[in-house]
Image (cartoon, rainbow, N blue to C red):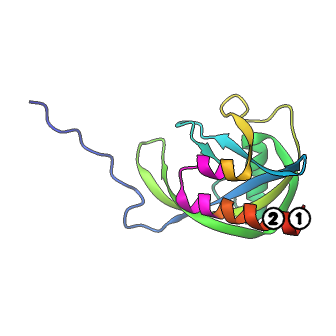
Amino acid sequence: MKPAKAKKKRVGAGSVVRTQYAALPWRINSGRLEVMLVTSRDTKRWVIPKGWPMKGRKPHIVAAIEAVQEAGLIGKMDKAKLGDFRYEKRLDSGATVDCCVEVFSLRVQRQRKKWREKKQRATRWFECVGAAGLVEEPELRDLMLGFCRGLPQQKS
């Protein structure tokens, strides 16, 4: 009988929660609010563009850079965060870390024809409520639904 396979130790267990910054890309198309989702590189789950802090850069700028790198998106990024959500990030080593992602609104003006991760990810516009139903993280889903309800009256 083979011995049980050892599980990778959780890097995040008992340690400080790591911070990431993300963009929630949106547009008004034919009078309807749409949100763009991108696929993650490894699991191909629907997510929003996000990444690690960058030395000397403000959080909303990091979120804007990630939106360009992961989805080719150019637009107006809010400086104030919309909210945050937590998730478990799987590292290349197979270990995981707990992350708290601060989310910033990005009103998309255009998408570039070429961007760094175009061949590694798919991008797609969804109606806001539909997009919320496709993400796995419950806190991100709630944040998106709150955004969907609040935006048309404020920024349409």
Residue 56 at least partly seen: no
Quadrant placement of the C terminus:
bottom right
Q: Which residue bears the numbered disc 1?
A: 155
Q: Is residue 143 left or right of residue 63?
A: left
Residue 76, x across and y down, in percent: 88, 57
Q: Furthest-bottom residue in view?
A: 80
The residue positioned 67% from the left and 48% from the top of the image is 131
Which quadrant of the structure image shows residue 20?
bottom right
Label 2 to label 1, Cα distance in Å?
6 Å
Dot 2: what SS? helix
Q: Nearer the viewer, residue 74 or 32?
A: 32
Numbered circles on residues, count? 2
Q: Does residue 104 sit above or below 126 in this rendering? A: below
Residue 55 in magenta?
Answer: no
Marks 2,1: beta carbons within 8 A: yes
Instruction: Using a 10 Å C-alpha cutoff, classify the residue at mark 2 as few (fewer than 14 neighbours), some (14 to 19) or many (20 or more).
Output: few
Range of the magenta residues? 131-142
Q: Is residue 21 above or below residue 7?
A: below
Write the residue at 70% across / 28% down: 119
Instruction: Give the percent coordinates (x, y) of residue 101.
Output: 61, 62
Which is nearer the eye, 33 or 136? 33
Please state the horizontal and vertical placement of residue 17, each as a whole percent of the image: 49, 66
Q: Which residue is mark 2?
A: 151
Q: Is residue 106 left or right of residue 54?
A: right
Q: Amino acid at mark 2?
A: Leu
Task: Say what amino acid the circle numbered 1 marks.
Answer: Lys
As helix, strand or loop, the secondary structure at mark 1 comes to helix
